[in-house]
Amino acid sequence: MNIVRVALDLPVPKLFDYLAPDCLESDIGRRVSVPFGKGSRTGVIVGLAAASEQPDAKLKAVTAILRDMPALPADWLALCEFCASYYHTPLGEVTSFALPPMLRRGKLPRIKKALRGALACLPSAIPVTQHAATPSTPAPAPVLPQLMAAQQSAVEAIFTTNGFHAMLLHGVTGSGKTEVYLRAIDRVLARGGQALMLVPEIALTPQLEGRVAARFPGANIVCANSGMTDAARARGFIEALGGRAEIVLGTRLAVFMPLPRLQLIIVDEEHDASFKQQEGLRYSARDVAVWRAHQLNIPIVLGSATPSLETFHHAQPRSAPATVQSQTSHATSPSRGGDSTAPQRVSGSLPGSAVGRCGGGASRYRMLELPERAVAEAMPIVRIVDTRREKLQEGLSAVLLAGLQQRLERGEQSLVFLNRRGYAPVLACPPCGWVSRCRRCAANLVVHLADQRLRCHHCGFEALIPRACPDCGNVDLLPFGRGTQRLEAMLAERFPAARVLRVDRDSASTPKKWQALLATIHAGEADILVGTQMLAKGHDFPLLTLVGAVGADAALFAADFRAPERLFAQLMQVGGRSGRADLPGEVLIQTEYPEHPLYRALVDHDYARFARTQLEERRIAGFPPFSFQAMLRAEARGIEQSLVFLSAARRAAEALAHGVTLYDPVPMRMQRLMTLERGQLLVESLSRPALQAFLAKWMETLYALKMPAGLRWHLDVDPLEF
């Protein structure tokens, strides 16, 4: 009697057994349609069994084994099993998440009928859809730029050692990291291999695809991101599975693309928080990519001008191992949180997972340095503007305004960077104290003057701007603070002859609008750019010579211990947009704290000094990477329900808490989101294996806890949000 073990997309940590008399060993990894309850579901066969824990009479037969596409390979299933184990998420939810929506529903994208039957047994029959057409005249070979010595050394280092090795490619902005990636990909393609390159944002994919396509005109390049249609994502997945995709470019979900000849993984801007999924399967694509490279015994390159402190730490010589202690704490620590760079081996985990603690020996990663810009360009000069001594005009100093005027006169472009969209963060009534608050979230409604709306940037709720105060009837409502819309209006008034262009998620709300904005900038049809972090990375604007950063000080004193790291990365990245051609660049940072070490390190372009200072502070405080963390969160209609559940979870954990610290449940910093009240419980350990062993046991008790109706909970391993 053949029994198949099926992973179904359900929030329960178990597999489901079904009868499948005609199932073969080769069907492991295939999608399968099965009866479930009164309906049917599509799952993935992850194993076969001779017997089941369920009585034979209760076993149902599968409806159909879907042999219309190749089976998902063993290494793909192993990747999903690792994620299920490390992130403590049911395997069925992981496999469902890793598949494109169309495939997880049991469907296929539309292809030629004649090829449908051949698809399962002959993957190469899949039609090539991107960049694979053979031109009538061979495309001329692209002219390659001359590599600097550091770039050439980095390329050689990637292939010097056989098998798995992780490298941090640390290069200043404009140092030619992308060229190193392309040379490495070229070597992989020459050997008949496949390459996977991850980028943090959808907005960076089209320009990277264009550059890669120009370099490899005959290669089949497949993109993977959540902005694509279901059919396009499914086609790309099938091309990768069949071995037709030679280069896969994508955001974090691309880490799950099946690639039978994968020989190189690249994670660009590895420090970016966008690589961490914040809903459903809360995985870090960077960390999963490191594990996947280890599993496949291939190299991985993590690139950044401002590496995450965890990655930078892993590229330093290691100190002696820390001592693991068993602790139970009743302290509340709302700012404690965690991240990791390489998920480590846990009890019962898969062979090949990397093993590590907070401790000693040689560096885990190899550091590859690109200390200079790739062409004859000087680094931009960074100047600190002391706003305590400067009278500001709508938030801008006289020094910055003068710099904008100079660039206008020279026909150069400027960027005013403010990472806050909208017109103003809040609308208020001074006489009575009313403020525009979201009725669904513990947040203010942001003023969007362009369409006369108040919007919540967390849940999407919106309302018309009131003509008068809802509480007292006062008609003189005032917007407090400033966003990109307000800066845009002020600059347009101050410089009436200038072409002011705002670039944020409102003006670039669709890929088409985003590409149009970029085209306008590259064509020199904008003089002053007002932008958020959308413009901070991955862009080369030859005419841009001045960057002014405003409103940065708030991050210096944020409760999140990662805020300084993110601020430094933002400012260094956005500053790197200036002076990228033969025109010198300048960066003006407005601050009330000009002597702050973060700003002094920026002036000197000294990331390493900043990183070492931050790491020492984290070592003293016991923050990651010197500890490992997980966060249990709960949300319900009332905060009492959330905290009661978390308190019960904590009591259940106390008997299991060897080598871990349990903190008391507290409300989340943003307590209410989309009408639900949220609480959290932090768990921390000096040992990743100890934390993972504890979480595995704890999850069993959590699933058994009684919950009030409407309460939801989840576990976030290596959390970034608090």
Image (cartoon, rainbow, N blue to C red):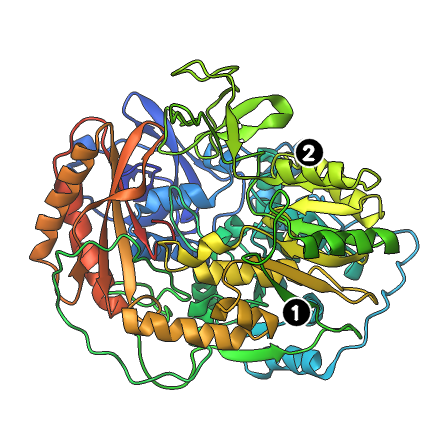
Where residue 720 appears, as percent x and y from the top left, is 38, 54
**Residue 173 spot, x, y in % from top left:** 66, 67
Residue picked out by circle 1: 188
**First of labels 1, 2 by sequence position:** 2
Residue 271 visible in the shown view: no
Q: Which residue does the image show at 75% across and 46% down from the upper left?
A: 528
Q: Quadrant of residue 278?
A: top left
Q: Between residue 89 and residue 480, name the one nearer to us.
A: 480
In the rendered view, does 12 fall on the left or right side of 141? left
Identify whether 620 is placed above or below 478: below
Q: Position of residue 546 (x, y in %)?
A: 73, 58
- Badge 2 marks a residue whose secondary structure is loop
Residue drawn at (63%, 36%) of the image: 485
Residue 32 place in picture, x, y as percent? 41, 37
Report whether residue 265 is seen.
yes
Q: Amino acid at mark 2?
A: Lys
Instruction: Say what amino acid the circle numbered 1 marks.
Output: Val
Q: On the rendered structure, is 547 left or right of 140?
A: left
Q: Residues within 10 Å of mark 2 (few under 14, many from 20)?
A: few
Q: Nearer the viewer, mark 1 or mark 2?
A: 1
Please tell me in which quadrant of the rendered image residue 442 appears. top left
In the picture of the structure, the residue carrying the numbered disc 2 is 112
Q: Which one is in front, 434 or 330?
A: 434
